[in-house]
Amino acid sequence: MNLKLRIWRQKNANDTGGFFEFEATDISEDMSFLEMMDVVNQQLVKKDIDVIEFDHDCREGICGMCSMVINGAAHGPQRGVTTCQLHMRSFKDGDTITIEPFRAKSFPVVKDLKVDRSAFDRIQEAGGYISVDTGNAPDAHSIPVGKAEADRSFMAAACIGCGACVAACQNSSAMLFTGAKVAQYALLPQGQPEREKRVLNMVRTMDDMGFGNCTNTGACEMACPKEISLENIALMNREFLKASTSER
Amino acid sequence: MGLAGAGWTLFVAGHMAGNMLIFAGPETFNRYGHAIVSNKPLLYGTEAFLILCLVVHVALGIILTIENKKAKPKKYAVAANPAKRSSLASSFMALHGSIILVFIITHLMTFKYGPEYLVEYGGETMRDLHRLTLEVFSDPLYVVGYVICLILLGFHLSHGASSVFQSLGLNHPRYTPVIKKAGFVYALVVAGGFLSQPLYIFFFM
C-alpha cells in the first residue's frame, strides 16, 4: 500500500516546528506502524535527509517507549494497543496519516516525534516504592493477599508509563498514570507503611510538574494501551482526601 | 467544583418542577411565586446558598481552565476517531458553562427584576408573573435563545451530574454505569421539562 504522511518535525524544544509531507511506498499491511516509519527513514537516508526521530524500544507493547499521536489519537485509532503493536492493516491504501508528538507542557519535544517524559520519573520517585526489610528473603506467602485485591492491583500495575493518558487529555492531566501508581500499592499490604505519604507526595509532585487537572472526560482511559480504568483516579481522589485531612 | 455544581444541579430540578405550575393556570402560578417571595427565610437562605455555590463554581472553573490551557499549549491538528474521542458535553464544559452564566444573569433581569405587573386574588395583591411569562415567551427571538441555552444546560448537566461522583472518589464497576445513565436521564428530564414551558406557551397559548 502507498500512503501520504504529514509528519511534525521540530529541531528542539525551542523550535516552532511544522508539518512536512512524506510518501510511504510499498508498505505491507503486515508491518507494524514503527516498521513503516523505519521504511520511510531508510528512504530518507538514501536521499541524505535527516531521519525522523521517534522513540521506540521493545516493540512488543510492554516497555512504554513508543509514543506518537496518529490521526489525533495517542497510539493510533485502535484501543488497547501501543504504536508498535498497531499494524498497517488498520489503514487503507492512499490514506493520508497525520503524525504528531505527544503534546503537553510537561512533555517538551526533544526532536520531531520524541518527547521528554521524565516528569513521570519525578512522580514515581515521589512515592512509587515500598519499604522492605533487609536480610534474608521472606517466605513468598508469608503475607496473605486477597485474590480480588491482587487482581485489581495487578490491573493498575499494568501501566507502562507511556504517557498516552497525558497526550490524549485535553488538559494534559497525569491523573490516570498517578492514579494507577497509587492504586497498585494502596491495594496491597506491602504498600501500607507509606500509603498516606505516597499519595500526598505523588499528587503534589504531579501538580509541580505542570500537568493539568482532571475534568473526567475519560479520554485517558480510551487512549491507554493497557486499558487502565478511571476507577484508579477515583481511588486516588479518595486516598488523597483521606490523607490530606489526617495529615499532621 | 463538583460540589458547588451539585447545589445548582439540585436547584434546577426544583425550579423546573415549580415552573410546571404555569400549565395549572394564572392563579396557581402567581400564588406559587408569591408564596416563595413571602417566605423570607427560605428565599434568602436559598439565594445565599446559590450565590455561594455559583461564585465557588465559577471561580474554580476559571482557575482550573487557565491551568488546563497552560498545561496543553498546543492542540492536535486533527481530532481523534470516535473510539478514542471523549463526549462533546465533557470536552466543552467551560464553553457551555460560560454561556449558561450569561443566561442566568439575563434570566434574572427578565423575570426577577423585570416589569412588576400586579394582580389581585381574594384581596391579596401579588406580582402577575403569569402575564410576564406569556409576554416574554411570545417573542420568537427570546424563545430561540432560551431553547439554545436550555439545551446547553442539558449538555452541562449530562456530564456534571455524574462527574461529581468520580471527583469525590465514588467509582465502582457496579454503580458507576448506573450513575452515568441516571445523570444523563436527569439532564434530559430537567432540560426537557424547562423546554416544554416556553415552547408550549409560544405555540399554543
Image: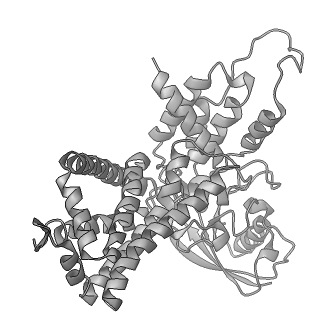
Q: Give left or right: position of A229 versus B106.
A: right
Q: Judge by depth and name the residue closer to the eye, A151 or A58.
A: A151
Quarter location, residue A151: top right
Above-or-below relation of A123 to A71: above
Q: Looking at this rendering, what residue extends furthest in the front direction? A: B122
Q: Residue at x 54, y 64 (%)?
A: B184
Above-or-below relation of A65 to B154: above
Q: How many marks?
A: 0
User: Percent position (x, y) of residue B59?
Assistant: 30, 50
Above-or-below relation of A144 to A7: above
Q: Judge by depth and name the residue closer to the eye, A152 or B165.
A: B165
Above-or-below relation of A217 to B81: above
| Residue A189 seen from this side | yes
Q: Judge by depth and name the residue closer to the eye, A43 or A83.
A: A83
User: Percent position (x, y) of residue B18?
Assistant: 34, 64
Q: Give left or right: position of A146 versus B41.
A: right
Q: Judge by depth and name the residue closer to the eye, A139 or B164.
A: B164
Quarter of the figure with the C terminus of chain A: top left
| Residue A102 seen from this side | no
User: Percent position (x, y) of residue B65?
Assistant: 38, 55
Quarter of the figure with the N terminus of chain A: bottom right
Q: Residue at x 49, y 50 (%)?
A: B164
Q: Residue at x 31, y 88 (%)?
A: B202
